[in-house]
Image (spheres, rainbow, N blue to C red):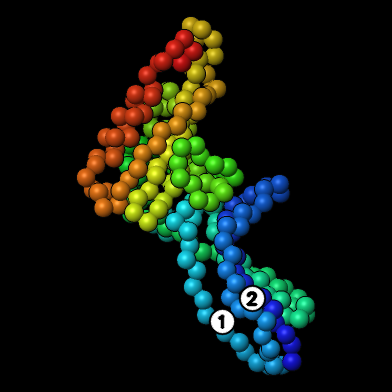
Amino acid sequence: TRSAFVTGVQTCALPIGRPAEVTDMPFQTVQLAGREMIRAGAQVTVPFEIQMPWETPITTVFGKYLTGMAIGLQTNLNLASTVVDPQDVDAVSIEPVPAQHRILDALSRLGFQFRAANLEKNRLDGVDQQLPFFQEIHFMPSRDFTAVLNDLAVSFLARPRDVQVVLAVNKKVRVLKGGGLGSRGQIFYGSFGVDYAALGRTNWEQQIEGWLRELAKPRGIFD
């Protein structure tokens, strides 16, 4: 007879191909069982469901994995300190909700091409953020914006009724007064909400393109 103590599951963001200095980011822990007595040879099943936070990072879009992203369920077991491998990690796929799909589709229709995704252990200003990190999905600029933009990143802060969309645009700046635009950039942020119930009432391609064209206009001597 052995004593099993605290069987639990932890939800972690696990960047694929991450460098050694980057650590996993646990964001949810659920205890499945407490101290139980298990007879030798007995089989024990612990059914469970995990309610993922609305802000859980996206890992796949229409089944295609986003480069650099993974979410895993890490199960921990302490069986009288005799288990050789007390941890098991299983990858799970997180698809965008329809509103997130719509914004990603709008960017694709505007000619922006997916580059990579990453997690930032930080907080975004001016938005209601629940998790201690946020996801950035990076796009290469379309032909219409390649002359003035280095990169566009979108972050989603989803909630039960809507999603807050944050666009971070790396805009090229002039290296010297009177010179051309260099590779050095300045980050500009824009945000807007998407109500799930009113998703189809807005031309999102038009709205996003209008904001980007306004942003692309020269604003000063070095911009």
- In the image, what residue occupies the spot 51% across and 39% down? 124
Q: Are marks 1 and 2 in contact (CB under 8 Å)?
A: yes
Crowding at mark 1 (Cα within 10 Å: few <14, some 14-19, many 20+):
few
C-alpha gap between disc 1 and disc 2: 9 Å
| Residue appearing at x 30%, y 48% in the figure | 195
Q: Could you say which quadrant of the image residue 139 lies in?
A: top left
Residue 215 makes an appearance in the image = yes
Say which element carries label 1.
loop
Q: Which residue is mark 1?
A: 46
In the image as oriented, which residue stretches furthest toward the top?
178
Residue at coordinates 21% horizontally, 45% vertically from top-left?
A: 201
Residue 95 location (% of width, % of height): 42, 58
Q: Which residue is mark 2?
A: 7
Is residue 78 found left or right of 192 in the rendered image?
Answer: right
Q: Secondary structure at mark 2?
A: strand
Residue 16: in sight, yes or no?
Answer: no
Residue 168 coordinates in the image, percent (x, y)? 46, 34
**Where 199 sits versus 168, above or below?**
below
Q: Is residue 126 above or below residue 1?
A: above
Give how far across and how far down residue 142 sits, in percent: 38, 32
Q: Left of 77 or right of it: where is 195?
A: left
Amino acid type, residue under disc 2 in the picture: Thr
Residue 172, relative to residue 163: is it above or below?
above
Residue in the image at 70% along x and 73% along y: 86
Along the horizontal axis of the image, is 33 left or right of 79?
left
Indicate the quadrant where residue 80 lies: bottom right
